[in-house]
Image (cartoon, rainbow, N blue to C red):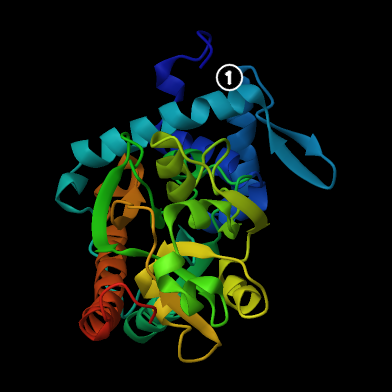
Amino acid sequence: MSERAPFSKIDLHLVKVLHTVVTEGSVSRAALKLASSQPAVSAQLKRLRALTGDPLLVRSGTGMAPTSTALALVEPAANLLREAAVLFGQRRGGRPFDPATSEHTFTIAASDYLDPLFLPELVARIGQQAPGVRVDLHGLSSDFDYRRSLARGEVDLVVGNWLEPPGELHLGRLFTDEIVCLVGEDHTAVRNPRGWTEARYLAAEHVAPSDFAPGMRGVIDEHLAGVGHARRIAVRSPHFGLIPLMLARTHLVLTTGRLFCSRYVDALPVRIVRCPVTFPPLTYYQLWHDVTHTSAAARWLRDQVRDVARTLASQVLPARAARRPAGSAT
């Protein structure tokens, strides 16, 4: 902040208003989140503008947008609020979280690569145990910077798979899964499994999910590049749950975890076949930032995510693996 701003004029609540107004990009939304009134937040924003010497929010189209100075202040404000929470006892979890009575809003960013039933099951579980809680779901895409959103407190949790998760984030390992291929039932990999070689796999036409972070390849292509290979990607889709329907009508190949694939083999004319390239197991994680690390509400949410993911995996993976003949399609 400006050197003209004496500490005697700054209180912790004003820092919280700064963080909330900038991350929400709206005085009215900030007022709702702070359980305050719009005139009160407007007055506090006026104080912040005087203290920083910057407008912080400016008109942009029909809404408001943070200035570069405002964006630069978000992370220091978040750090200060986190340290204050530790200083005043939230090291032990802060205010208790009662799911039965809470009206909290959780924001979760997740792909549907894990299991098409994961998000429906998670939402149902939260609804049963915490009927007053709201859930905002965001997809993972190349235009969504999940690391920045976690650091700014805009997202509570991110669920997905990474070969190496970002080092600055906390992580919880959910489970690991075998990487397999899903193809239409008349694909050559089904009709001639012995001829389904590494060379034919790499030369085949593949369908892959759209990149979910700027400049970041998915785990399949990242591993292939690491061993000096590249595959032919004919289709990229942001809608992972629609890919099995594409496979049923084409000769495309999807490479992903067995858990996801197993949900479709009884409902569509598709089959799971072994992958001729050796991949490390696919590991799914939930990631979160220091901003929410000590929050009792966020800990409760992480427990629900862990339990739902592991329950779904335990219902499908052991049974499928036990029935699978070695080297054949399933």
Indicate the position of residue 207 as horizontal and vertical percent values.
Answer: 60, 60
User: Which quadrant of the figure has residue 93?
Assistant: bottom left
Q: Which residue is mark 1?
A: 52
Q: Quadrant of residue 237?
A: bottom right
Q: Is residue 41 left or right of residue 62?
A: left
- Work out whether residue 48 or residue 161 is closer to the camera in this orientation and state it: 161
Q: Determine the residue located farthest toward the bottom in the rendered image.
A: 266
Residue in the foreground of this view, choosing between 45 and 221: 221
Quadrant of the rendered image containing residue 103: bottom left
Q: Position of residue 211 (x, y in %)?
A: 57, 48
Where's residue 18, x and y in %? 53, 35
The residue closer to the viewer here, 322 or 282, is 322
Looking at the image, which residue is at 28% across and 36% down?
84
Q: Position of residue 23 (x, y in %)?
A: 56, 42
Q: Amino acid at mark 1?
A: Thr
**Residue name at image x 31 percent, y 68 percent:** 305
Q: Is residue 53 above or below residue 31?
A: above
Furthest residue to the right? 61
Q: Residue furthest top?
A: 3
Report how many numbered discs are placed on residues in the image: 1
Asked if residue 95 shows in the view, the reply is: no
Vertical order, 27 against 32 (above or below)? above
Left or right position of 260 against 31: left
Q: Is residue 270 visible?
A: yes
Q: At numbered mark 1, what does the secondary structure look like: helix, strand or loop? A: helix
| In this picture, residue 277 sits left or right of residue 110 | left
Between residues 142 and 145, which one lies in front from this camera angle?
142
Q: Residue at x 23, y 85 (%)?
A: 319
Residue drawn at (43%, 48%) of the image: 219
The crowd level at tag 1 (other Cα within 10 Å; few <14, some 14-19, many 20+) is some
